[in-house]
Image (tube, rainbow, N blue to C red):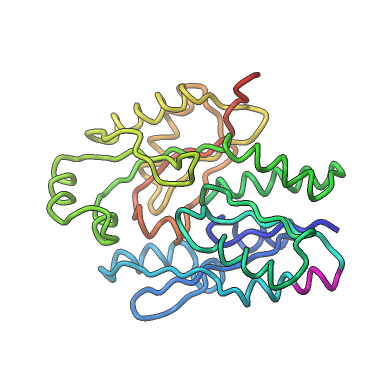
Amino acid sequence: MIRILVDSSSDYCQEEIREKGLVFVPIQIELAGKEYLDGIDLDKNSFFEMLEESGEFPLTSQPSPQVFLDIFQEVKEQGDDLICILLSSHLSGTYQTAQLARQMADYEEHIFLIDSRAATYNIKVMADYALELVREGLSAAEIAEKLEKFKSRVKVVAMIDTLEYLRRGGRIGKAAAAVGDMARLKPVITVTKEGEIGVVAKALGKNKAINAILKWVGEHPLDESFPAYSLYSYGTENSEIFEERLFKEGIRFAERLQIGATIGTHIGPGAFGLVYVEKEQNS
């Protein structure tokens, strides 16, 4: 049997985790003096409400090697294969922790670790693709090989509504955040092929940010044989405006999905964007 593992940065809801038979590993979030397991005892709306109220920057920590080792040993006892699709190694130590646990489990030929070089619903798109390949009867090694090629085609582009949460995380200074917010500066970001956060544009206002997103999507055209998803963090007003523009441009998406705590920590409320699969370069 081939099983698929994702961490909570994938932002799958627990109902979908159960329906699809995924193995789920939560990332730990510390906020307002309390510790939570992302996706288990901290839902997305509650997280953003606490984020706004606390004024603090949440701390995230990757699962311990023992968490992965327990799963790997169970997989070994069952004689199964396991494909793990994990948060970008440039954003977290989760991938490195899983590597250590795999060595300890002494079952390396049956455990395949995929550094997604991404986060949030990029991982969902990859996991859904992996599940489809399982249904098609491919081996775990074949699926892992296809995922390594596929992951660079999974794109995300989004607008950040406020610079406050980048300031809280120490990524920009207090003065820069204040000036940027006063000037209505809206960074448009993506995740690079290396798995790092990259800036696509620094737009003045939401309309120009939407224009920048659409321009970027035009430069990285959608493969309509895969579903696209409209994303939002907290509050749907901005995403609704964005979706109206998507419809006008003839860009269709399967559903609107909410970003969770792992990435929401850095982007805050009001963010919106699109995740999709890019057409193959040679097609």
Where is the N terminus found, in terms of image quarters?
bottom right
Q: Residue at x 70, y 43 (%)?
A: 129
Q: Nearer the viewer, residue 142 or 242?
A: 142
Residue 86, how many percent across, how many down?
59, 56
In which quadrant of the rendered view does residue 198 lie?
top left
Can residue 254 be found in the magenta stretch?
no
Q: Nearer the viewer, residue 81 or 275?
A: 81
Start and end of the magenta stretch? 73-78
Q: Residue at x 75, y 62 (%)?
A: 108
Q: Residue at x 69, y 46 (%)?
A: 128
In which quadrant of the rendered view does residue 33 lie?
bottom left
Q: Residue at x 57, y 37 (%)?
A: 152
Residue 106, how many percent across, how many down?
76, 70
Q: Is residue 217 left or right of residue 57?
A: right
Q: Is residue 54 left or right of residue 1?
A: left
Q: Is residue 60 left or right of residue 181?
A: right
Residue 124, how many percent across, how many down?
61, 49
Is residue 115 placed above or below 103 in the rendered structure?
above
Q: Nearer the viewer, residue 192 or 49?
A: 192
- As drawn, the residue found furthest toward the top would be 283
Instruction: State whether the magenta stretch is mostly helix, strand or loop.
Output: helix
Is residue 121 placed above or below 40 in the rendered structure?
above
Q: Is residue 253 left or right of residue 261?
A: right
Is residue 166 placed above or below 252 in the rendered structure?
below
